[in-house]
Image (cartoon, rainbow, N blue to C red):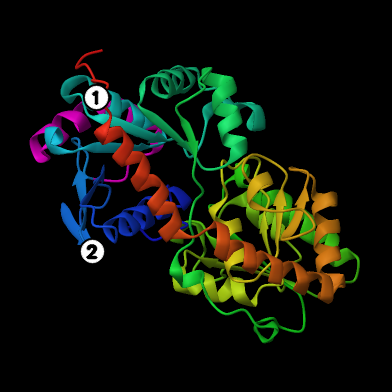
Amino acid sequence: MAKLGGKQSGGQNNYVRQLAEALAKRGLCVDVATHWNDPDTPQIERFGDGCRVIRIAAGRKAFVPKSDMLNLLPAFYKEMKTTLDLGGYDVVHTHYWLSGLLGLMIRNDYGTRIVHTSHSLGIAKAKATGTVEEERLRAEKEILGRVDRVIATTPTEKDIILDFAGMRSSVSVVSIGVDRSFERAFTAADKGESPLFVYAGRFEQTKGILTLLRAFRIFLRHGKDARLILAGGAEEDIDPKSGLPLKARLRSAVAGMEDRVIFLGPLSQVELADLFCRATAVIVPSYYESFGMVAAEAQACGTPVIASEVGGLQDVVQDGRTGLLVSAKNPAELSRGLRRIAGDPKFAERLGRQALKRARKVFNWPAIAADIHEIYEVLYRAEDPVFVGD
């Protein structure tokens, strides 16, 4: 329910909400349990047609960094048991490894069927960034090995899961869908005369934002006239007077390009859709993405994507057909991608048309919800017993 692009509110939040709403349209009642990170919001809030978000304080009704959430899980679970009828759910679908641990607790105590979607894998993050989180790796291996079904969002993610956890039969690939806000009729008139490149996401190093700024600087050195809009980050990351980032590294990376680089802060889905439709290309320069929601949303707007050739982005973006794939952490190669799109409008328009066609077919929430609903039904009706405390 939080505004996207801020601290810890991004593609995963968006996915959970849209999946809940799509499942509700199929007649399911969906409760979403999450941490109560804003004391000004109610504990229970209804959304969609038959969905509720239930906020759990776990002793801290305030923003809590993901790095601190593991220590709150016992309190979180204790409060869940008093707030929710945990034994009354037919299936519990957990998202991310922290929620996966809660799912195992529910499975132990109530024998409930558990479906898990990782969204991000510690082993993939370690390979991309060099940061190894041993506790997370141990937890993810246990989760992936014990839940009743794992949903991977791309074939690449499935391969990583199978290699990491040694599983064979309990991983299903179901794509991520795109919000209706992005399902707009594409016309060339949406695009301006001069190139406009767009980035949307958190302002974190692993999202490749510094790589993008360096690539754009190289692009401008080639005498190209263009603008770069960066949407996202937390509102407190932007100086309200100058409109520039407060972080020194970002400010330094923008120096000399202030008239070409615009920081907008977090945007609504409708605002993002409008921005993507106007863009020459949307850039996803991440070090790693298990899926890459922004890449799918941009394609649904008829806009080509230039993305890092990593993780699920390799499945979401078809190189040379719906966008371009470039090496991660490589400003020079990314800059060449910018020049190729900006320098060949007919090529860019063709990519956009093909991106829109594919998005309508692949990133389709009704079809995705039907696939996930079927997984729930199969597990719910399975005769094999789930033993409490196994």
Q: Is residue 47 above or below residue 124?
A: below
The earlier-in-sequence mark between 1 and 2 is 2
Which part of the image, by quadrant, shows the N terminus?
bottom left
User: Label 2: which residue?
Assistant: 49
**Mark 1 touching mark 2, by CB under 8 A?**
no
Q: Evaluate whether residue 96 shows in this view.
A: yes
**Which residue is more in the foreground, 387 or 160?**
387
Q: Evaluate whether residue 268 shows in this view.
A: no
Q: Quadrant of residue 62?
A: top left
- For residue 214, side relative to residue 125 (left or right): right
- For residue 77, side relative to residue 225 (left or right): left
Secondary structure at badge 1 equals: helix
Q: Quadrant of residue 164?
A: top right
Within 10 Å of disc 2 (Cα), the crowding (few <14, some 14-19, many 20+) is some
**Magenta span includes 177:** no
User: Label 1: which residue?
Assistant: 107
Q: Residue at x 91, y 66 (%)?
A: 222
Image coordinates of residue 51 in percent, x first then y, are: 22, 56
Image coordinates of residue 147 in percent, x first then y, are: 36, 25
Q: In the orientation shown, which residue stands out farthest toward the bottom?
A: 189
Q: Magenta residues?
A: 62-85
Q: In the orientation shown, which residue stands out farthest toward the left?
A: 82
